[in-house]
Each structure stands twice: as C-alpha cells, then as structure tokens.
Image: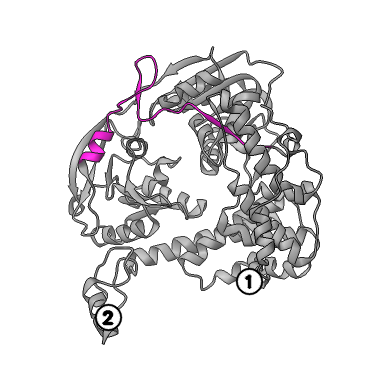
Amino acid sequence: MARGRQKRPSRSERHRRRNPPRRPISELTVRLPERRVEPETVIAHLGPTNSGKTHDALRFLVESGKGVYAAPLRMLAQEAHRRLSAEIGEEQVGLVTGEERVNPGAPIVCCTAEMAPASGETLVLDEVQWAEDEERGSAWTRLLLGGEYRHILLLGAVEALPLVRHAFPEAEIRFFERKAPLDWTGRRAITGLRAGTVVVAFSRRAVIGLAGELNQLHPGAVACLYGAMPLASRREEIDRFIAGRAEVCAATDVLGHGVNLPCETLLFAETTKFDGKERRDLEPWEIAQIAGRAGRFGFHERGHVGVLTGVPWADPDPELVRAALVPHVPIEDGHLGYRVVDSGRLRPQLSDLNVARVDELEPALHAWRQAALRYWSVDGWLEVESIQPLLVRLDAVRDALHHARRTLALEDVWKLVQAPVDEDGAALLGALAAAVAGDKPQQTIIGWILDPRRLDAAGLEEAEQAAREASILRWFALQYPGVAGVTIERAAELEETAAARVVRELRAEIEEPTIGRCRVCGARTAPWASLCDRCFMARGYRSRR
C-alpha cells in the first residue's frame, strides 16, 4: 500500500520525532470530565457471566423507553440491537458504532462505549471494568465522571466494586449469582467429545490446527472462532453451533469477550498464552472469564469445565484450571473475586492540549501525559491511558502528508488519529489522510483496496486482512462521505465479500489442513511448526553437509 512508495525519514527526522521538544506543563490543561446534573439513580449490577445482570438492565432500559446501551465491542452492541429489535420492534432501536449507523435517532440506541452520547435518559454501561483498560479505558471513565443521564446502570464483574464506589460512592449495589452452576469435569479425551463442547486454545494457528484435529472425528461439524475473523464470519460460525450444524467448536479467548455460545462443556486445550512479550500461564481471572461461558442459562442446567487430552502438542495444566474456578481475592465487604479493579484511565481531548498546529501535537501529548501523572498522583483511582496508539496513528498520518507534500487542518489530523486502527492498519490510514488532503494517486490505491474482485483468489490471511481494511473504510466513510470514492455501501460490500471468503477458506483449511501438517511429508506437527521433527533434522543435516 502507500507505505511502499514512501521515502524513509532521515536520521535527523527520526531523532526529532523520538525526542520532540517538551512543552511547559503550565501551558496545558489537565481537567476531569464534569457533570452539571447528577443522576437520579445509579445502580450497579455486579456478578459473573451468566448471572442475568445484563438481562435485568435491558429490562429497565426497555421499560424506561429511552436511553443507551454501551458495550465494549461492536459484536456486543450488534447482539443487543438484534435482541431488542426482536422484542420491541426495529423502529424503536438503533445501532451506532465506529463503522455503522442504523436508525441512530431511535429512542433506544445500542452502541460501543466510544460512541455513547454525553447525556440522555438512561445509560446502561456494560463491562464497566474496561475503565482500567490501558488503551480504551478513557471512554468508560469519561462516562463515569461526566455522563449526564437521569438513570445510570453499571454492569460488570464483582472485581469492579472498588471502581464503582470511587466513581459513585452512594451507588446502589446489586450482586448477582450464576444461574447455571459450574462443575469441574477433569480430563476429557478428544475422541469422546459430546455435542455442545467448546475447546479453547490461545492463538489463531493453534485454534485452526485444533479445528482440523476435531474435524477428523466430527467431519463437517466443527465451528471455529478467533479474533482475526470478520464479525460476519463469527456470526455464521456461532449460528452453525447454535443450530447444531456444528457439534463442537474450537475458539480462542475471543470467547470471553462477548461471544455468547450455548455450550454445555468447555475444555482448555492450552493453559499458556503469548501476551505480546512472553509465553506465560493464564491468569486465574482469564480462566474464569472464559470458563464462565459454559452452561448458558436457558440451554443447560449446569456447565462443565475441564481440560482436553489426546492432542500431542497440547499440554494443559488441569490444576491451574480447577483452582481458577474458585474466586480467592478479597474485594470488599466479604466478596471474593479474581483481581481488584479500582482504577479508571483517561486520555486527553484536543481541547486539553492547547495547540494550534499539527507539529505541536506530539510534544503536547507527551507533556499532557507528564502533567496528568503529576496531577492525578494524589487521586489513587485515576491513571493515564497509553498515548502510544495515538502516536502510531499520528506518525502514519504525518508521514503520508509529508511524502504527498500535502497538509491537513489540525482538526482533521486529530480526527484521523482517533481512528479505530491497529498498527497493521497504519499504512491504509496514511493513504486515507493523503486522500483527504487532495492527493490523487492515493485514490487509485484506495480504489484497488475497495474492489472485492481482488478476493477471488485470496487465501485465508488475505481475506482476514481485507475485512480489517473494510472496517477501517466503513469508519472513514462516516467521517468523510464520498472522499476518494469511499462509501458505506462499497466498504460494506468489501466486508461481506471478505467475510464469505474467510468462511470458505477456513472450511477448506479445517477439512484439508495445512496448519499442523509438515510441509515436506504431511505428518502432523504442532500448529506453529512447518516441519515435523524428522524432516527438520534431515534438513538440518543436509544444510550442514
């Protein structure tokens, strides 16, 4: 994409960016969100997964007839939108995320936390413990501190009790218990899995390899879920499992983040994961969050949790899982959980930075962070959200504008810096920034990205990448309608085509796996290995000769 055409910044330029001039802290405004009108009621529903806390909160929202349901994930917002639309009618419910707008003027709106309005009648803020998330927590914290609603309902794990009391000392706390108890089922062999079983591993390759193993025993009846899948692909896999067309499911820990499956038994194929720095044991709260998906109320009387055996490359620790089924960390008032969530994070808004030019943004962000760290050091529950994702996007935008010899207004640059883009989408973001600034060559690149025909021969990873690009383009179309030929319709078509391609290629990979197969002799290997031990040793011997 656009980065391939760009000249590498000089050493002096890179040094300048890594060491921007610091602005005096006195020039910056560090302030907390404030509400002018206090809510009439604040109620917190705290409890584990499958305890009915969300159900009761949505009942209150429907009865009030007007308000907002704010979730951490687009998929959760979509699920609530479908659920409420079926109950009270599509015309009464809207959906607003960074990538889509459906009936946004409806009395009840389901949205992601970043898109929640600052005021309204009723706010249902789900997964309130996300306030301490290093990269997205600010959206929750700003609603906790400044959201002007008549009624506020906070939903989350019992671990969030200290956070809730920091934000609302007088809040009414309602504790919820699981409706379907969890039982430890020990070791279960892969050869004897019953329908309704979900098996969990902790990387994309591990899950696809595991799905291939399961397909040998359940031909054509294996669902697969992992984070890089487009939402439409996930929905199709979930629907197959719910309808019984898939008997078993292989999933990553995406299962613990808003994917509600009616699974009776959940088995861990792994109890370690790579967290971006090192491979480590799962934390008890991570295990509990995933294990809680077993035994969904209304489908099963009980849930069963254990570990999978019979897969040569998987070696889960049963004691680690069994111990994590019992909360052991004291929270408050005699309640036990798995960790303590007692902080909320904030990051600056443009008005906080006191800047007039784009070249002032980076030093101002660093200075604001230092000022905020000093300012909040006396208030133990507020912390500074990471500014690194903002700096990555800012770099992408500035690089693209520099090489295109274009400029953008400060407000446009800040809008682009807020884009829902990971590091692997930075190049596309740069191309979009240059297009907004009027650089014509970028339109050719963007036009090619938008063309779903490029997916005709795409492999699985290419289709996943196209779906991520489509999501960015949907966001862009809402910010800059029609610029560079990007429209919601074209971006949606690309996303749908990519999702369909992912499902097709995933099915082929599961039925005729290459992941978990030696590329020389075809023997089974660990999913992360491309050669079996025998071929690896033979290849190493030949290379030494």
From what the image shows, is residue 266 above or below residue 240? above
Q: Residue at x 33, y 39 (%)?
A: 287
Question: What count of labels does the image hold?
Answer: 2
Part of the protein shown in magenta: 319-348
From what the image shows, is residue 234 above or below residue 347? below
| Residue that extends furthest to the bottom in the rendered view of this protein | 545
Which SS class for mark 2? helix
Where residue 208 sits: x, y (%)?
35, 59
Label ID, residue 4: 1
> Taking the image as drawn, is residue 217 in sight?
yes
Front residue of 426/26: it is 26
Where residue 314 sits: x, y (%)?
24, 55
Question: In 3D space, how far apart are the residues under numbered discs 1 and 2 (Cα atoms)?
Answer: 34 Å
Amino acid type, mark 1? Gly
> Taking the image as drawn, is residue 103 in sight?
no
Front residue of 413/421: it is 413
Q: Is residue 106 left or right of residue 265?
A: right
* Magenta-span inclusion, residue 344: yes
The N terminus appears in which quarter of the rendering? Answer: bottom right
Front residue of 171/262: it is 171
The C terminus appears in which quarter of the rendering? Answer: bottom left
Q: Residue at x 63, y 62 (%)?
A: 427
Front residue of 461/451: it is 461
Which SS class for mark 1? helix
- Quadrant assignment, res 23: top right
Label ID, residue 539: 2
Label 1 Cα crowd, 10 Å radius (few <14 / some 14-19 / many 20+) = few
Label ID, residue 41: none
- Quadrant assignment, res 264: top left
Amino acid type, mark 2? Arg
Q: Is residue 504 left or right of residue 265?
A: right
